[in-house]
Amino acid sequence: MSYAASAECATADPTITPAQVWAWLGEVMDPEVPAVSVVDLGIVRDVQGSQKLGWKVIVTPTYSACPATEVIADAIRDALHGHGAGAVDVQLQLSPAWTTDWMTPQGREALRAYGIAPPVMRASGADPASTLKAQVIDITALMPARAVVPCPQCNSRRTRLLSQFGSTACKALYRCLDCLEPFDYFKPH
């Protein structure tokens, strides 16, 4: 399968490998949180192709209506072209849906260092479908447990949820009860 060769292929470096493409994608920062790369955020799902055939980068946005999706696709193309990659096709893959479980440990630490508390629990807990098989459904069993969210500023565990909605749809707003700073929490989903 060919990924539509372009004029860029004629001048591109023929020795580029998929591992190099992954490394360069690790330099592309998320436009909403410029402290974490699209690789560490877990939205780059796969890299396919070669310098001869062109590169296909498969991306799953954090949610299907993410306003930064096109900006991210452009940044990926620009970064790879800047390193001499030939044709670059960025494709969206909406299924399976992105989950915070795909974030790397480096991405979680980058969020914390940036002042955003990373998810403190896995999004993929107990299978809700198994709970639905019971005759009587305990609705609280379907709701995630409220975890303690440490403050990214002072690491205090004495924090309080102010709002389920933070600066973006994927974040909640918390306040530290020790340093009194408000902060975003990247909700697990």
Image (tube, rainbow, N blue to C red):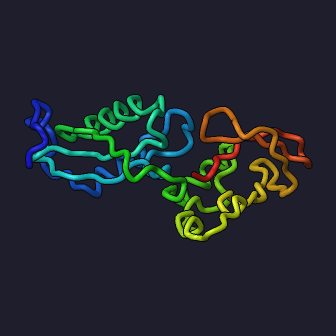
User: In the depicted view, which residue is nearer to us: 106 or 175?
Assistant: 175
- Which residue appears at 28% of the width and 39% of the height? 90
Give the left or right position of residue 102, taking residue 108 as reference.
Answer: left
Q: Is residue 160 above or below residue 105?
A: above
Q: Is residue 145 above or below residue 2?
A: below
| Total numbered labels | 0
Q: Is residue 148 above or below residue 71?
A: below
- Which residue appears at 8% of the width and 45% of the height? 2
Considering every residue shown, the one lying at the far right of the view is: 178
Which corner quadrant of the image does residue 92 belong to? Answer: top left
- Which residue appears at 58% of the width and 58% of the height? 123
Give the left or right position of residue 48, taking residue 129 as reference.
Answer: left
Which corner quadrant of the image does residue 81 belong to? Answer: top left
Give the left or right position of residue 126, taking residue 120 as reference.
Answer: left
Q: Position of residue 104 (x, y in %)?
A: 51, 58
Q: Position of residue 144 (x, y in %)?
A: 68, 58
Q: Position of residue 32 (x, y in %)?
A: 55, 34
Q: Position of residue 76 (x, y in %)?
A: 34, 38
User: In the depicted view, which residue is nearer to us: 180 or 102?
Assistant: 102
Which corner quadrant of the image does residue 13 belong to? Answer: top left
- Which residue appears at 79% of the width and 43% of the height? 174
Give the left or right position of residue 74, taking residue 39 as reference.
Answer: left
Considering every residue shown, the one lying at the far front of the view is: 135
Q: Is residue 37 above or below residue 72?
A: below
